[in-house]
Amino acid sequence: MSMNRIGYYLKEGICGVFDHGLMSFATVCMIVSTLLLMGGFSLLAVNINKIIADLESQNQVAAYVDENLSDEEAEALGGKLLEVGNVASVTFITREQAMESFLSQYEDNSLFEDIDASVFRNRFIVNLEDLGLMETTARNLADVPGIVKVSAHLEISRGFITVRGIVNAVSWAIVGLLLVVSMFIMSNTIKLTTFARRNEIAIIKMMGASNGFIRWPFTVEGMFMGLMGSCVAFMLLWALYTLLARKVAASALGFLKIIPFGGISLYVLGAFVGVGLAVGVFGSRVAIRSYLRV
Amino acid sequence: MIRLEHVYKSYENGTQALNDLSITLEDGEFAFLVGPSGSGKSTIIKLITGEISCTEGEVIVNGYDMSRISRRRMPRHRRLLGVIFQDFRLIENKSVYENVALAMRIAGASGKEIKERVPYVLSLVGLEDMMHAMPRQLSGGEQQRVAIARALVNNPKVIIADEPTGNIDPELSADIMTLLTKINELGATVLVVTHEKDLVNQFAKRVIRIANGRLVSDGNGWYIA
């Protein structure tokens, strides 16, 4: 393809956007609204996943050490626990620390004045890599010589896994559905613009233009509108997300850690540009197909 | 060369547009194709341009068998034709220059060739001063001259003019026809479809007369309806 022809396609495609201003505006608005919906929903899903992951990380396993072992022997078990699969980290808690922690739970702890640290066991707080493997990991931890008991909240971990699975499935299903719907709407919107230009297409075809020669300016036009739509949608989502994050932080839900937009902005921009371009190109190529059979 | 050999054409609604029609136009020939409305003139043009194909018979244009031509070859075939329509069919949002240049772009001409050739062809039709005007700013006669320039710009072997004077003032019709005869003198085969008897009679050229899809007469001279 010669530079002269590439220049022509670019010029025609970009001029086409402005020559058919109203239809282009409608198409860009359509892209912006569908991308906003998709982007908004994806960010909601990502945040829910993050919140669940944070909560999961707080669901720890306690491994109690045999009371016959000395403090040094007990602490030395940490290395063996780390060798167990799915263990992310271990923290050693001495009998004294365990007692302090126990007493701090009660405002009036005069009842436990005479309690001795020796009634508590040395223990390890174990963080897991994958909460889904908690049951197996707990069994493996219990098998480590010197560990006498393992305490794990299996019901809570199962609950988290179920919630995360549902959130993932629902959010991706909705994002997929929105993508298909937006492609369909886009292709229909572009069909309207090409319908208005069907005579122009017929004239050019009669002059001996190949399908590619006719299609490329429309493809460039679709790409340009997709690009414009994705940039506008990105900026709007940025503004709306930041505003919403501030409102959440200032409200009773302030304990929820919302992912800052700056940390995910490049992914969002990449996804928006990719989807915007794909929708624009696909929409324009589908829309023009029927007018090429002259 | 254009050759129609025992051509039949019937449409899906049952209309029999052409009935055993045979016509041959040699290279460099000029002919008027005349006949009343519904006689099959437009069908002949569509067969030549490849918009439709015949039900039976053979249509050969510039060596292409139109019933066997592939989709890929069709653009190349159309680039060898210059077609002029009654309603001009200019692209409204392009200037006179761009309308003519488009035909060259389609044929794959370079930017330099376009810059040299378009002003020259526009000067042939007397529109060199209106290069940057938009079609809506031109009269009917001027728009038709732009359409002629567009048809001419790629030096086509064959020029087909479908009622080229149908939408312009009678006094300008003779000018347009004179222009077409000059193009013919430069070597192109020209087929002019018209039903303007007086205009045809001003030029002593071959007249092919059809009615009801059949050839009525074919010869040099006058058009007697």
Image (cartoon, coloured by chain):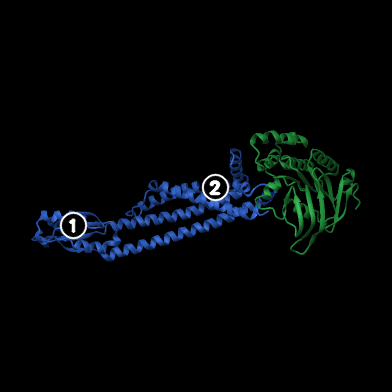
- Chain corresponding to green in the figure: B
Mark seen at residue A115: none
Q: Is B33 positioned to the left or the right of A273 in the image?
A: right
Is disc 1 in the same subunit as disc 2?
yes
Residue at the (66%, 54%) spot, across then down: A293
From the image, state the color of chain A: blue
Does residue A240 sit above or below A135 in this rendering? above
Residue at the (79%, 55%) spot, across then down: B5
Residue that protrudes farthest toward the bottom in the picture:
A155
Residue at the (56%, 54%) spot, across then down: A186
Q: Percent x, y for residue A123?
A: 16, 58
Residue nearest the observer in this picture, B192 or A244: B192
Residue beneath label 1, please? A124
Q: Is A49 positioned to the left or the right of A37 in the image?
A: left
What chain does mark 2 sit on? A
Residue beneath label 2, please? A223
Residue count near mark 2 (Cα–Cα under 10 Å), binned few <14, some 14–19, many ≥20 = many
Q: Earlier in the sequence, mark 1 or mark 2?
A: 1
Q: Percent x, y for residue A84?
A: 22, 58
